[in-house]
Amino acid sequence: MKFLMPIIFIVIAISGFAFFTNPRYQALQTKISEQKQLVEANEKAARLRAERDRLLTDRKLIRVDDETRLEKMLPNSVENVGLVIDIDNIASRYGMNIRNTKVSEIGSRANATIGPDSKKYGSIALSFTITSDYNTFISFLRDLESSLRLVDITALSFSTARDGRYDFNITLQTYWLK
């Protein structure tokens, strides 16, 4: 009996640990882990709120006319009609009319990549013809260069029209945010 009592106490202690203490300890460890995740998520949310507030403050510092100019420079949609109107307005200052206007999306068919498109912007090509003398054409290009809309002239050709005037065939590329 002297040896049996310590063995019974050891068995009771082991079974108490196995059936009572260990499950509670594991549950406590799970709750501590969940609490750590919640604290990390709360800290991340606080950092995101602070960043949001900073960005909103920065946005309030942008003047309305500057924001309008930014939207014109890099619009949120294609706006090819607006682009044609802008170019026609520049041309009309010099008594020129644009004609043979063609708009095509770049990379939409032949040069399309396989998989999702990760670019944050899109682009279109605009081709048109104007008739003018050389000096007026250079002035037109300077005004086009200083306009707010981002454009890259990708092709330029010319042919003689009449009276020292030329037909200039221009292809340009413009961009917008997706």
Image (cartoon, grey):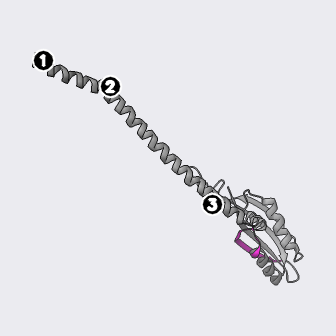
Q: Residue 27: x, y in percent?
A: 39, 32
Q: Is residue 59 above or below residue 40?
A: below
**Any part of residue 89 in sight:** yes
Q: Quadrant of residue 155?
A: bottom right
Q: Is residue 152 above or below residue 14?
A: below
Question: Which of the numbered marks, if any, corresponds to residue 54?
Answer: 3
Q: Is residue 176 above or below residue 13?
A: below
Q: Quadrant of residue 153?
A: bottom right
Q: Residue 79: x, y in percent?
A: 77, 58
Question: Which of the numbered marks, if any, corresponds to residue 153?
Answer: none
Question: Which of the numbered marks, if any, corresponds to residue 4?
Answer: 1
Earlier in the chain: of badge 3 and badge 1, it is 1
Earlier in the chain: of badge 1 and badge 2, it is 1
Tell me the residue that label 2 is attached to: 20
Q: Residue 81: x, y in percent?
A: 81, 59
Q: Nearer the viewer, residue 119 or 155?
A: 119
Helix, strand or loop under label 3 = helix
Question: Callout 2: 10 Å neighbours few (<14), some, many (20+)?
Answer: few
What span is in magenta? 146-160
Direction from residue 90 to residue 3 in the image, left or right: left
- At horizontal 49% and vertical 43% (from top left) the residue drawn is 38
Direction from residue 123 to residue 163 in the image, left or right: right
Where the N terminus falls, by quadrant?
top left
Where the C terminus falls, by quadrant?
bottom right
Distance of mark 3 from mark 2, alpha carbons? 51 Å
Residue type of the residue flagged with mark 1: Leu
